[in-house]
Image (cartoon, rainbow, N blue to C red):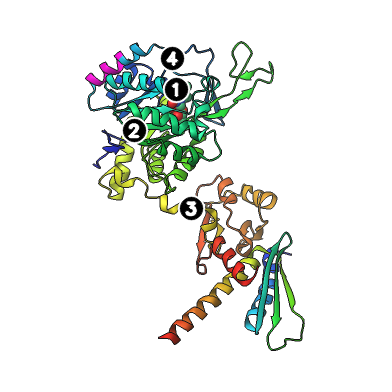
Amino acid sequence: MADLRIDFAGIKSGNPFWLASGPPTNTGYQVQRAFEAGWGGAVWKTLGEPVINVTSRFSGMHYGSQRVAGFNNIELITDRPLEINLQEIEETKVNYPDHTIIASLMVEPKREKWHEIVKKVEAAGVDGLELNFGCPHGMAERGMGAASGQVPELVEKQTCWAKEAAETPVIVKLTPNITDITATAYAASQGGADAISMINTINSLMGVDLDTWNTIPNVAGKGTHGGYCGPAVKPIALSMVAECARDPDISVPISGIGGIENWRDAAEFMLMGASCVQICTAAMHHGFRIVEDLIDGLNNYLDSKGIASVMDLVGQSVPKYMSWGDLDLNHKRVARINLDQCIHCNKCYIACEDAAHQCIEWFVDAKGKRALKVREEDCVGCNLCSIVCPAEGAIHMIDQPGEFPMTWNERQHLIHTIGG
Amino acid sequence: MHEHTQFMNEKVKIDQILQRSYLIISIEENLSGTFVTVQPQGEQESPPGTVHLVTADGRRYLTSRLFERKRVHAQKSENTAR
Ligand SMILES: Cc1cc2nc3c(=O)[nH]c(=O)nc-3n(C[C@H](O)[C@H](O)[C@H](O)COP(=O)(O)O)c2cc1C
């Protein structure tokens, strides 16, 4: 059994699986049940001046037979007074002293407001703080959440204010609703953040009802943009984590959030530089007990790789992630069709003919049967045929022995020296 | 014409440039592709010629060969220095 304990910016946790701030961490009752189920930590539902929420609040993106491929919400931060939350945090910490509780915070961008809330929540015994600079709706209109999180100077300044009062580690939660997340990640680290977490939800409008022409979701027929999360956002979240992890100017630990549903997703985030992961939608969809599979799966994976501690996984794939200009232009990959597995659906042929490089063609085999083969010299190795192929193992992408590597950057430099 | 056939035609031209003693004066890349301007060596009077590469493989091949040539030269001068 591998060691799943982590040290995240000085916060020790029994395992890397934390519930992200959201409905599953709204109350002490829920967080205690989550800890009982095996979660290593929980980021409490964001604390601040209690809000009034609307109904309805959520909508799900169902794609084919997959329910909740994506999830959208227009819920705000906690609607309960600070004192009640703090009382429950204290009680939870007493009952579960070895579990991690992080207080998520959002207040107006004023120094005294940050000082006040930081001192109050730390007195309740939290292990760390997460500054919510990410909520894209409602709170942003009041100058908080994403409205603060999109302006690097405000991120830096508010992090500074929180740090002035904080005795526990400060994690800054970043919004993905920005062109370059490394700008705000850098601002957070300049402000003294001990760690960063990403992503909060992505601006979204789930849909429009074609009968009523109301937006989805809507409140008495009126809608507003919400925050998108769940499995569909994982590639976006992963790339943002990777961009921060590979940036030499951002050296604080990262907590990965966004679309994590199973141990594989979690391991990918950790390989890409996250030293813990947070989960919201998957817990809302499947319940707290998914943590059992997360723990078992990650444990088995680490054992199969001969890795003793989960911390040894962190960042292993980061050196393999770079700018496009540093990729090898001479690497050659081609598609090959395995006729034993091919079901003759022609999807690869149509895809290549209509949307790729027209390099899959018919031939008649020895038994006089028509079949498909790839004209490898014209194949550009785009993967489209293998992506659309419904038959497992029918199309393999084969790496071909190539020449010495040559990147775009090296090539442009060479042309420049010749006189391009 | 299949792109590969087009590339093979360009490859022949590139190999000619590199095997015979041509001096590459410039490589210009623009919306129309890559233009390689060469001057036959020892024939200073004859005007420079231009090879136009339109395939991606042709453009890749040209610079790969130039890299190879650079590498061989570097190796040679390293050996003579020893
Ligand atoms: C209904 C709902 C409410 C949320 N509320 C908060 C919140 O109060 N504070 C916060 O920082 N993030 C909040 N989030 C964002 C999540 O913590 C998380 O960043 C996001 O959902 C992406 O992770 P996921 O794909 O695992 O859900 C909320 C998400 C959902 C779905």
Q: Amino acid at mark 3?
A: Met
Q: Which residue is mark 1?
A: A110
Query: CA separation, marks 2 and 3?
Result: 27 Å
Label 1 marks a residue whose chain is A
Q: Residue at x 44, y 43 (%)?
A: A244
Against A201, is A27 above or below? above
The lab-note entry on whether marks 4 and 3 share a chain reads: yes
Q: Residue A262's spot in the image, x, y percent?
A: 40, 35
Against A49, is A197 above or below? below
Q: Which residue is mark 4?
A: A49
Query: SS class of the residue under badge 1?
Result: loop
Give the magenta-colored segment's residue range: A87-94
Label 2 marks a residue whose chain is A
Say if residue A378 shows up in the picture. yes
Picture quadrant of residue B13: bottom right
Q: Is disc 1 surrounded by few (<14), some (14 to 19) or many (20+) residues within 10 Å? A: few
> Which quarter of the rendered image does ligand 1 occupy?
top left
Q: Is disc 2 surrounded by few (<14), some (14 to 19) or many (20+) residues within 10 Å? A: many
Q: Residue A197's spot in the image, x, y percent?
A: 41, 34
Q: Amino acid at mark 2?
A: Phe
Query: CA separation, marks 4 and 2?
Result: 28 Å
Q: Which residue is mark 3?
A: A322
Query: SS class of the residue under badge 3?
Result: loop
Image quarter of the N terminus of chain A = top left
